[in-house]
Every structure is written in C-alpha cells, then in structure tokens.
Amino acid sequence: HDLGWQLLGDAGLAQLAQRLRDEGTPQPVPVPNGLAITLRPYQREGLDWLQYLRAHGLGGILADDMGLGKTAQALAHVVAEKEAGRLQRPALVVVPTSLLFNWQAEAARMAPGLRVLALHGPDRARDFPRAAASDLVLTTYPLLWRDADALAAQAWHLLILDEAQMAKNAGSRGARVLRWGRSPLVVQR
C-alpha cells in the first residue's frame, strides 16, 4: 500500500485510520547496535513510536519535557534506519543556532558510527557537496532560507526539526522552505 503523505479526502483518512487500527499499537523494536548509550524505558518507547510512524509513512512529534532525551531518541531512530539499510539519503536536522554544537557532540557520543556534517559558518557552501555522503546533516533555522536552493538539491531520507516552534510562523522564510508540498525541501522515501 502507498505510504505517501497524500490522503484523498475522507476516504483516504478513513483508510489510514483503519490500517492503524488493524495493525495496533507500536511494537518494541531492537535498539540499534550502533547506539553507544543505553536508552531508558520511555526513550525505547519513543524509538518504537518513531519506527511505527516511519512504517506507516507518517510524521510525528516527540514532546517530552526538556532534558528527557529527545535527541537520543531521534539519533536512535536515525541509527535504526541506517542499520536497516533504509538510510540511502541523509537525514536533515534543523536546530536553533544555540543547539548546533550540542547536536554535533551528542551525535559523536551517542551514535559514533554516523557520518555527521554541520552546515554552518561563512564557508559552509564548500561543504554542500558532502551532504550526499553523510548520514546526518545539521543546519540552523536562520540558514534555511539562505541555503534553500542547496538544501533542495539534495534528497533527504527524513527531516528532524528540533525546537520546531521556531518555524511556527507560517509566513516566515524558514517555514516557507520547510512547508510540505509547496517547498523544495521534501523528504523522499
């Protein structure tokens, strides 16, 4: 069955709802071998949830309280995708500028097998060609609209928005770059 984002009216939504009812709740998935930390039980549930959403072609939100390991869950999801052979294109992570170095450090500590590229700074254009060979590409909200064409030239496996409220103003340039269906930044399955 089609796992795309397009639902055709009420019938498409009803079909998706029935498929989710038939398949039940998220089932436990193995923690990826390449994860260098031990997930807490609720973080394992977060990984199960993210893998469930992926299996159904859906996006989702991790809305845990601050400090409970959303980054760990997101990295575990990316590592699981890589180990399953599905990470044929990089995952794009968009973060506030203040969190860029934290993501780099956490990825190095928690998922040392991931090839991470940070697109930041005045010379970042020279790194755009390296995106395709990376597993995880990090950029910031202020750079989204500036780098929209370069980011659009790359196909992405998934898009992770840290502090997604940064793009909540639908009229902002960053939100326009991210908007599904009207943007060059589209996740390709």
Image (cartoon, rainbow, N blue to C red):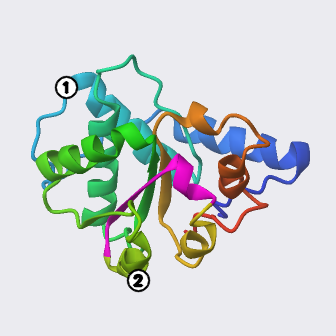
Q: Position of residue 139 (x, y in %)?
A: 44, 56
Number of labels in the image equals 2
In this view of the protein, can residue 27 be seen by the observer? no
Look at the image and say whether residue 135 sits in the magenta stretch. Answer: yes
Instruction: Look at 29% across and 21% down and name the residue there.
Output: 67
Of residues 85 and 113, which is closer to you in this image?
Answer: 113
Look at the image and say whether residue 155 sits in the magenta stretch. Answer: no
Instruction: Look at 13% across and 54% down and name the residue there.
Output: 33
Mark positioned earlier in the residue sequence (1 or 2): 1
> Where is residue 87, by image quadrant?
bottom left
**Residue on which disc 1 sits:** 40
Instruction: Look at 53% across and 56% down and name the residue there.
Output: 143
**Residue on which disc 2 sits:** 129
> Where is residue 45, by image quadrant?
top left
The answer to whether residue 135 is above or below residue 79 is: below
Q: Position of residue 19 (x, y in %)?
A: 64, 45
In this view of the protein, can residue 10 be seen by the observer? yes
Query: How many neighbours does mark 1 have within 10 angstroms: few (below 14), some (14-19), or many (20 or more)?
Result: few
SS class, disc 1: loop
Query: How many neighbours does mark 2 have within 10 angstroms: few (below 14), some (14-19), or many (20 or more)?
Result: few
Placement of the C terminus among the 4 image quadrants: bottom right
For the record, the magenta segment spans 134-145
Query: Which mark's residue is nearer the viewer, 1 or 2?
Result: 2
Q: Position of residue 147 (x, y in %)?
A: 56, 66
Q: Which mark is residue 130?
A: none
The answer to whether residue 5 is above or below residue 184 is: above
> Where is residue 113, by image quadrant?
bottom left
